[in-house]
Image (cartoon, rainbow, N blue to C red):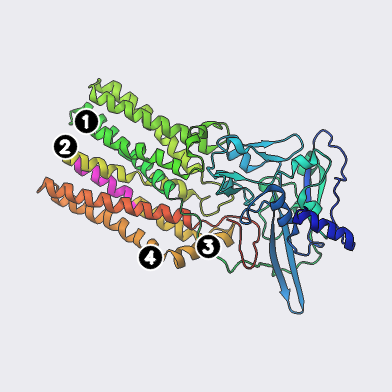
Amino acid sequence: MQTPLESFIDHKADTGMQCGSYSIDVPPLQEGEQYRFHFDAVKCVGCRCCEVACNEQNNNPADIKWRRVGEMEGGEFPVFTQLLNSMSCNHCIDPECLKGCPTNSYIKLDNGIVFHDDDVCIGCQYCTWNCPYQVPVFHEERHIVTKCHMCHERLDEGQSPACVQACPAGAIEIEVVKVDEWLARDIDKEANMPFLPDARITNSTTRYTLPDNLPDTMKEMDEHILKPAHKEIPLVFMTVLTQISLGGFLALFLGDFMSLFGFESTNWVMALLVMLPAAIGLPLSALHLGRPFLAMTAMKNIKTSWLSREALALGVFTALMGGVTAAYFFEWPVFIRIVLELITLATGVYGIYAQSMIYRIKARPSWNRVTTKYKFFGVAYIGFFLVALLSSLSSIHEAVVPLTTLGMLGALAQLFFTYEDIRTLDTEKENTYQLQRTKRLLNENFKNIKEYRYLSLLLGGVFLPLLSLVFASVSPTATAVTLFLALAVVFVSELADRFLFYTTVVPLGMAGGFFVGKQR
């Protein structure tokens, strides 16, 4: 019994419809060459046979599309232009998915195909963030990321990919490209398509043929569709908790350092409680993975992946904090303990820096801004409030006022970073379209959470700590209670801000469909 694809191809043959050939009509690859797609937008009729054929060939469900058709329009009646883009993986020369993957799941084959090794994928979905074309897609049933591999098994047999065979208009072809020549050329007219990210970001190899005299007023057919991004709740908690531990450990170090000058030292219980947020947060990040039991393999690609660097650095940071806790418990000499704390602190700083660099990616403009780094480090002020509270409960009263004051200054800085983060959405010149849509999400979908963020930061970061300072010389109990309330309020405030960080990002990508929008 024939499959729908085979029946469709036979129907085209019987009716004389033009169709992509079974055999691939390209010469053998020479040194320095690779395969690529060519899409002729003049020929495309928008039938989406390529989508259907790709899904059938690769046994994908309807919501997983390795090849997608995007819709654009422009001009004014009666001179009206419809433009379509059929795109799968661009098999880039410098693929961002490959560089960022923490498990080395991506391989650039000798024939140029960017191949995804499903067996070692942990489903972290970092590649779905990194790719400016939104090509890799998370497969819910398989718990991994999947993508187009140019039907490499068919190419090996001298046959063209399923999408090429199924296209009734012959709009998709396989070509051979000389890599060095392609890189040396001005590829703006050949590799770029309206509403598609610049090909130079990854040196995409796909070649486009576009209609002449495209209108200046082109727009995406799905611009009316604006959906929040994934909430990423495990990452919301993991990032905030590890950043709190860094701030708390810095406060702990300052307290221990001051003991050299005769001040009362911190203790092992405080060290343990400072370590606790990171110890809880890091395992939570595994809940974000499609295959959490392979979480440890996320450290395989230290060479190019910021995710691998973050996982290693924060894992070592947490372990070293455990060592510092032991040093307190066994009453090691203060000087030795401080040296160990300096090493631990440097490791933690690098870990949070690597964590922020995970999000400094061109494919997601609202993340790829300097305020991301500032706000990630800014969360450390909560750690000062935490150690101030622990000092109050441990009757180390002389540390409460300076630590609370430093925490307040940090909260004010975080308030400024939050304001700048939103204000600069109007001033960024690049990727304005995506940033303005981020602003719309903030003002329309999440207005209440945005307002809560400001108010809670003022309440928990400034007003309640000020009140605790008033109580400091009067009632230690009132001071502790007020600091606890401040700590709770700012913790929820930072969770709310990180929730907005993930849900309001609008990535680069190709145009979507009028009814379905973009693949997410």
Quarter in which the C terminus is drawn:
bottom right
Which label was assigned to residue 227?
Answer: 3
Residue 277 sits above or below residue 327 on the image? below
User: How far apart in space, not on screen, are marks 2 and 1 (Cα)?
Assistant: 9 Å
Report, in whole angstroms, how far the alpha carbon at label 2 lies from the one at label 4: 38 Å
Amino acid type of disc 2?
Answer: Ser
Q: Residues within 10 Å of mark 2 (few under 14, many from 20)?
A: few
Task: Give percent across and percent down for residue 490.
Answer: 30, 52
Answer above or below: position of 101 versus 471.
Answer: above
Graded by Cα atoms within 10 Å as few (under 14), some (14 to 19) or many (20 or more), the crowding at tag 3 reads: some
Left or right: where does residue 149 sit relative to residue 314? right
Q: Which residue is mark 2?
A: 394
- What residue sits right under mark 4 in the picture? 448
* Residue 139 visible, this angle: yes
* Amino acid tagged 1: Asn
Measured Cα–Cα span from mark 3 to mark 2: 48 Å
Marking on residue 25: none
Report x, y in % for residue 122: 54, 39
For the residues bearing labels 2 and 1, Cβ distance under 8 angstroms: yes
Main SS of residues in magenta = helix
> Which tag, 3 or 1, sits closer to the chain's start?
3
Amino acid type assigned to the residue bearing label 4 in the image:
Asn
State whether residue 208 appears in this view: no
Q: Which residues are magenta?
A: 399-412
> What kind of residue is marked 3?
Lys
Q: Nearer the viewer, mark 3 or mark 1?
A: 3
**Mark 4 vs mark 3: which is more N-terminal?**
3
- Residue at which label 1 appears: 267
Q: Are marks 4 and 3 in contact (CB under 8 Å)?
A: no
